[in-house]
Each structure stands twice: as C-alpha cells, then as structure tokens.
Amino acid sequence: MDFSEKAYDFCLGHGAGKREAYYISLAAEEMAGNIIKHGFFRDGGHHTMELRVIHKKNSFMLRIRDNSHIFDPIKKMAAVSSINDPSRYIGIKMVMKMATDVVYTSTLKLNNLVIRIDMPEEKQVHDPDDEDD
C-alpha cells in the first residue's frame, strides 16, 4: 500500500469525509512526485523525504520534509501565475486551490511544506470549552 492510500485511510478513520481524505492523498502524491522528479534526480545525491498526516480537531495537515534542493511551491505559483498554459504546473495549482492553507519553510537545509485542509462546517466538532464566555 502506498502513502497516498495510507493517508486516505487515516483521514477516513479520523472523521474526514471522502472529499477531504481524497484531497490529502492527492496532495501527498502530487507534491511528493514533484520533489522526487525535480529535486532528487537533480544532483544525483542521497536524499530523503518524510510524509506525515496530522489530524487536529477540524483539519488535516500533510507535512512533507525533504533534503532536496530548496523549492518553495508558494513562490513558484506566484511566479507562474501569468503563464497562459493551463496544464503547466497543474499538480501544484490543484493542491494550492484545494488547500485551506499552505506554509513552506526551509530550515537547516530541509524543505518543510505543510498543507492544511479543513473539514466542512457540517463535519466540524465544536468544543464548548473552546468558546469564549
């Protein structure tokens, strides 16, 4: 079983709908594929990648950490937004559109990408202890 299937099953097992589970698994497949294709083979060095799905109350986060060359997909999207070819960078575009939030940092020569997808309002769990009095 590959990671995207495991991510999908994890999300379903923690209360996500099929849509949110699909988004997380698709994001994992698209972004990991880009890292391998454009980062790992670029310099022929030894590289590693860690993918982790995190469930926090009403959202799911995909965290990808790798030691490939620096690649910020947020900056890349800004740079290519004027390209007229709709199929160019389609995987990154899809991930950015379906995500609630995307954060990229590069620390200690590690790329860290966190993609958050919130559950729809009807599936969210509301904790009365979290509300202001």
Image (cartoon, rainbow, N blue to C red):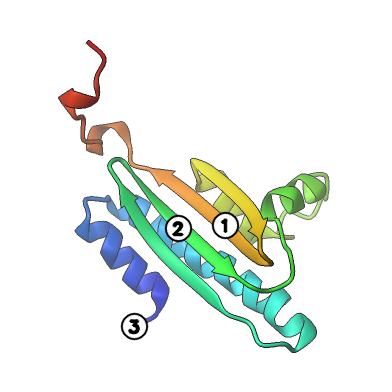
Q: Earlier in the sequence, mark 2 or mark 3?
A: 3
| Horizontal side, residue 118 vs residue 87: left or right | left
Q: Quadrant of the N terminus?
A: bottom left
Residue 102, position as x, y percentages in the image: 56, 46
- Whether residue 82 is visible: yes
Q: Secondary structure at mark 3?
A: loop
Label 1, label 3: how many angstroms apart (C-alpha)?
Answer: 23 Å
Q: Secondary structure at mark 2?
A: strand
Residue type marked 3: Met
Query: In the rendered structure, which amino acid carries the disc numbered 1?
Result: Leu
Q: Are marks 1 and 2 in contact (CB under 8 Å)?
A: yes
Callout 2, which amino acid? Leu
Q: How crowded is the residue under tag 2: few (<14 C-alpha within 10 Å), some, or many (20+)?
A: many
Nearer to me, 103 or 86: 103
Residue at the image position 47 percent from the left and 63 percent from the top: 26
Residue at mark 3: 1
Is residue 19 visible to the viewer in this orientation of the structure? no
**Numbered circles on residues, count:** 3
Residue placed under numbered mark 2 in the picture: 62
Q: Is residue 48 above or below residue 51?
A: below
Q: CA distance from mark 1 to mark 2?
A: 8 Å
What percent of the width, then of the height, locates residue 65?
Answer: 55, 66
Which residue occupies the extreme top position in the image?
133
Q: Earlier in the sequence, mark 1 or mark 3?
A: 3
Q: Of the residues under marks 1 and 2, which one precedes in the sequence?
A: 2
